[in-house]
Image (cartoon, rainbow, N blue to C red):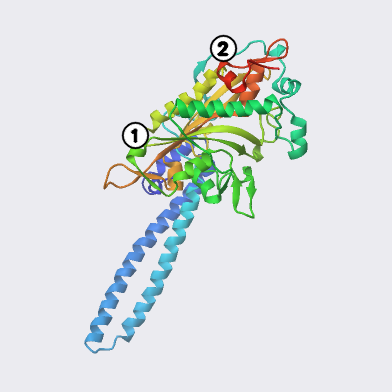
Amino acid sequence: MHDIRLLRDQLDRLREGMARRGKLTELQPLLDRADALEQARRAAITELEAQQARRNKVSQEVAQRRKAGEDATELMAEGRTIGELVSALEQKRAAAEAEVQALLFEIPNIPLDEVPAGDESHNAVVKAWGTPRADGASLQPHWEVGASLGMLDLPRGAKVSGSGFIVYRGLGAKLVRALMNFMLDLHTEQHGYEECWVPLVVTRDTMVGTGQLPKFEEDMYAAPADGLFLIPTAEVPVTNLYREEILDASDLPKALCAYSACFRREAGSAGKDTRGLLRVHQFDKVELVRYASPETSRQELELLTSQAERVLELLELPYRRVLLAAGDTGFSSAMTYDLEVFAPAVGKWLEVSSCSLFTDFQARRANIRYRPAAGEKPRFVHTLNGSALAFPRIIACLLEHGQQPDGTVTVPVALQPYLGRTTLG
């Protein structure tokens, strides 16, 4: 959520940010409405203050007349009329403030200056590591090799839960556990993260805090009878752990990680990448979350992204880092790097991680602050998160990149201790 002062003092900056996202035409009526409401709110405050001053003066005159034994009936009636007007103005101000706040929930974050303007065609590859396999045409796609090795049972996943749900079996199930332990060990033992184990359902306020609601409610799985939502990512509960709290400056940067199952209806993605593990409704992921000061958050994004990249390097998966253009950057994010791995049999670069800096956008929604020094006014933290990593596409790429002519799959050296074997099959 934006600081309301942007509407008061920097509306052009807000409009320019939305133009870089390609959203200005869509959001212009909303911005105009928010601006008009803010003007009405300020006018109501000015009139309210004037009427309160007038009411105070009338009250003083009533007291003076009574003290002097004079009739104050007319002044008392005037005071009641002013009181009714004050009450109406207070309601008008409160209604304008509530509507402005609701509108602010609908406006995306402003991209950082270094984020390219435009849609996804302006995304920029800023780093590449490793060499993708060039013999993809001779390889089995991951859903075939996974089924032949008894690791994936997609038909029965669809039977019990519908399309987009996975059953891992045998070595497939063990691979999921191996990836979870490998990633959590790496981040806690080498990257300095505190591990958390968080609930898979959260309240509406928690979803609002990180920006999933109200904008993307149709994409979420919900339990309306309980007022709860299944989490789309561990980012949601982990980021909200310190909602409505004030941290000390010594607490920053704070680094938290968590494994969780994730649930996404993805209502707007029907028909896209539906084969195998490319787009599913329930998946497993290790998430990294960081709190930082505004002065260090940009450097923290580089650190966070490099930690996600380290997972890919240890898994021996060639990848590229992509700086997303403003129009392809998520609603709450000010800057995002996507990490993509090439699936040679599928013939596509697959996004396996998004590492994002949210500036104070989420912290304002969740009211997460820190005190820079004793006696100083609290400031909003900057939040960051990144997948490190999401499992299904990693498994797809492992099955395709490590595939051998005899149908087995080579296990990366770093993962071998967790699986207790060097090959799958």
Residue extending farthest to the left is 68
Q: Amino acid at mark 1?
A: Glu
Q: Earlier in the sequence, mark 1 or mark 2?
A: 2
Q: Residues within 10 Å of mark 1 (few under 14, many from 20)?
A: few
For residue 295, the mark is 1
Q: Position of residue 294 (x, y in %)?
A: 36, 36
Position of residue 376 in the picture relative to residue 37 (left or right): left
Q: Position of residue 403 (x, y in %)?
A: 67, 14
Image: 200 above or below 170: below
Image: 315 above or below 359: above
For residue 125, the mark is none
Q: Position of residue 314 (x, y in %)?
A: 53, 18
Name the secondary structure under disc 1.
loop
Q: Amino acid at mark 2?
A: Thr
Kindly tell me whether residue 120 is visible in this rendering.
Answer: no
Image: 122 above or below 227: above
How many numbered marks does the figure carry?
2
Front residue of 42/216: it is 216
Front residue of 121/162: it is 162
In the picture, the quarter occupied by the C terminus is: top right
Which residue is found at the position 36% from the left and 39% from the top?
A: 251
Image: 119 above or below 239: above
Front residue of 315/134: it is 315
For residue 131, the mark is 2
Q: Position of residue 195 (x, y in %)?
A: 49, 35
Name the secondary structure under disc 2.
loop
Res. 52 image quadrant: bottom left
